[in-house]
Image: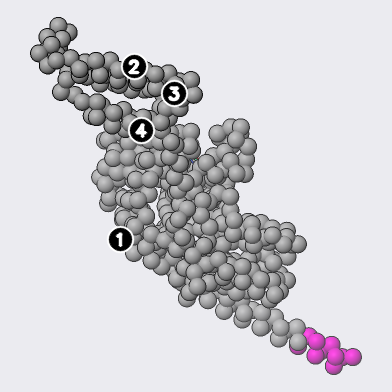
């Protein structure tokens, strides 16, 4: 008995010693690995609100909100560092939908912006395009960040349809400028929120729904970079996926139930995007919280994804955050997606001819008829003009109208015949008398 007790005591001591050593190694290990610095910058009113939303739930990244509007900055979460600029141009206000002013304000602050963006690894720029500050300043922030060698990803929303064509035009122009200055970019049209909420919902609720969804996806992406996993995805993988310039990117993260068979479909088909992962050249898929993920399940998922993306796409797969009772989360990042459906271009409506226009055209015809009083205008010349006008306008007539028109034309011809038959010396007198 004594021998047995001694043996188990010795075993306990031995086990404790190993555990202590393991802890020491674990403590030393992180120091060797480069600590990745992630920075999120919200530019303009909407961009600031989204970054504010993310900052509530993410700890390991740094957050900035950049704006000329001091009132808007006051509403930003205390976890976000405020960057107020452009006082000499806007005097503490917004730009009033003037992207040139937004751009100029950012240009004048290049040095301060550089200080914010330097010594970072991964920079995420977020702006709601359509206003002046976000649309004008985002391309300047992007250029500086890329110039500093940061991996730079831009996330942009497009205005609602009801906000009008001017805002959409500002947004499109800004997007054209900014995308080549980024490694990758995502576009979320605000209008898409009506795929998930009622059209009658208040605007505040609609904006909040988009901001929350975006915040969820970005949070998951940041978690993947930091959280060690069973199959680990690290910053080097992210770099591989983001490598390049102006890559259209799809980022979506969803929570699923254990038996959810449509999970992969849900993560691939986010209602917020106008495009999907089709043709993507880089894919990162991470599943967190699923302890008992079988190889068959992994295989099924990767088959579905491989079928949609580019033949030679790099696909990186990770499993992380395997904790008891944690929810299962699937995060999908795809870069270099096909650009076909980036914007839904408004369909050109066939031109309708208004009643007033029709009247005008009729008047034109009459003018021509009047000019026939001039004998130099022949009937041959008049008829083609009438035909052309008819073809262009395509006025619909009923049978009665057509009959009346014919009768009128015949009467005209008869009257002209009379005119032609008149001897030339009388013609002169007639035209003089008119
Ligand atoms: N998704 C989302 N979109 C927003 C939000 N706030 C504004 N927007 C959209 O973004 C567009 C631009 O608005 P802001 O971001 O306030 O504009 P800004 O960049 O500050 O520009 P100025 O105020 O004109 O200087 C709006 O037309 C909205 O469509 C938001 O919180 N979430
Ligand atoms: Mg503003």
Instruction: Look at the image and say whether residue 244 sits in the magenta stretch.
Output: no
Mark 2 or mark 3: whose residue is earlier in sequence: 3
Q: Marks 1 and 4, how far apart in space?
A: 55 Å
Instruction: Look at the image and say whether residue 7 sits in the magenta stretch.
Output: yes
Left or right: 396 in relation to 25:
left
Mark 4 or mark 2: whose residue is earlier in sequence: 4
Residue 68 percent across, percent down from the top left: 35, 38
Q: Marks 2 and 3, how far apart in space?
A: 14 Å
- Could you say which is closer to the camera, residue 48 or residue 263? 263
Nearer the camera: disc 2 or disc 3: 2
Determine which residue is flagged by label 2.
411
Name which residue lies at 16% across and 20% down.
375
- In the picture as drawn, the residue positioned furthest to the top comes out as 433
Q: Marks 1 and 3, how far apart in space?
A: 71 Å
Q: Marks 4 and 2, how far apart in space?
A: 25 Å
- Could you say which is closer to the camera, residue 188 or residue 258? 188
Mark 1 or mark 4: whose residue is earlier in sequence: 1
Residue 124 percent across, percent down from the top left: 44, 55
Determine which residue is flagged by label 3.
402
Determine which residue is flagged by label 1.
147
CA neighbours of label 3 inside 10 A, class few (<14), some (14 to 19), many (20+): few
Tag 3 secondary structure: helix
Residue 150 percent across, percent down from the top left: 37, 62
Mark 1 or mark 2: whose residue is earlier in sequence: 1
Say whether marks 1 and 4 touch (CB < 8 Å): no
Left or right: 390 in relation to 331:
left
Q: Marks 1 and 2, how far apart in space?
A: 80 Å
Determine which residue is flagged by label 4.
392
Main SS of the magenta segment?
A: helix
Tag 1 secondary structure: helix
- The magenta stretch spans which residues? 1-10
């Amino acid at each position: 008995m004594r021998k047995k007790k001694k043996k188990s005591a010795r075993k306990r001591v031995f086990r404790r010693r190993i555990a202590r050593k393991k802890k020491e190694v674990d403590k030393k290990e992180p120091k060797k690995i480069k600590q990745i610095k992630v920075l999120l910058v919200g530019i303009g009113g909407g961009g600031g609100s989204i970054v504010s939303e993310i900052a509530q739930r993410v700890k390991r990244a740094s957050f900035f909100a950049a704006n000329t509007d001091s009132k808007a900055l006051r509403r930003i979460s205390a976890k976000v560092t405020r960057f107020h600029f452009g006082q000499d141009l806007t005097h503490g206000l917004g730009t009033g939908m003037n992207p040139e002013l937004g751009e100029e304000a950012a240009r004048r602050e290049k040095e301060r912006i550089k200080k914010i963006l330097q010594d970072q690894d991964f920079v995420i720029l977020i702006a709601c395009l359509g206003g002046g500050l976000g649309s004008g300043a985002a391309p300047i922030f992007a250029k500086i960040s890329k110039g500093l060698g940061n991996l730079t990803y831009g996330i942009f929303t497009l205005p609602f349809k009801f906000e009008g064509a001017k805002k959409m035009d500002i947004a499109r122009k800004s997007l054209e400028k900014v995308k080549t200055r980024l490694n990758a970019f995502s576009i979320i049209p605000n209008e898409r929120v009506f795929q998930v909420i009622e059209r009658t919902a208040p605007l505040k609720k609609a904006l909040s729904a988009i901001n929350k969804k975006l915040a969820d996806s970005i949070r998951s992406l940041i978690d993947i970079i930091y959280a060690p996993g069973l199959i680990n995805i690290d910053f080097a993988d992210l770099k591989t996926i983001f490598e390049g310039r102006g890559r259209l990117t799809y980022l979506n993260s969803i929570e699923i139930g254990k038996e959810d068979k449509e999970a992969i479909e849900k993560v691939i088909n986010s209602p917020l995007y106008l495009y999907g992962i089709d043709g993507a050249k880089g894919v990162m898929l991470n599943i967190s919280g699923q302890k008992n993920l079988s190889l068959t399940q992994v295989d099924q998922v990767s088959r579905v994804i491989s079928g949609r993306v580019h033949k030679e796409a790099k696909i990186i797969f990770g499993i992380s955050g395997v904790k008891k009772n944690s929810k299962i989360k699937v995060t999908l990042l795809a870069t270099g997606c096909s650009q076909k459906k980036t914007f839904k271009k408004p369909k050109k409506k066939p031109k309708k001819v208004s009643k007033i226009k029709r009247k005008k055209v009729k008047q034109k015809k009459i003018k021509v008829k009047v000019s026939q009083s001039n004998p130099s205008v022949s009937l041959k010349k008049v008829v083609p003009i009438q035909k052309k006008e008819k073809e262009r306008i395509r006025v619909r007539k009923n049978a009665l109208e057509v009959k009346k028109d014919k009768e009128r034309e015949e009467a005209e011809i008869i009257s002209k015949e009379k005119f032609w038959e008149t001897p030339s010396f009388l013609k002169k007198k007639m035209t003089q008398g008119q």
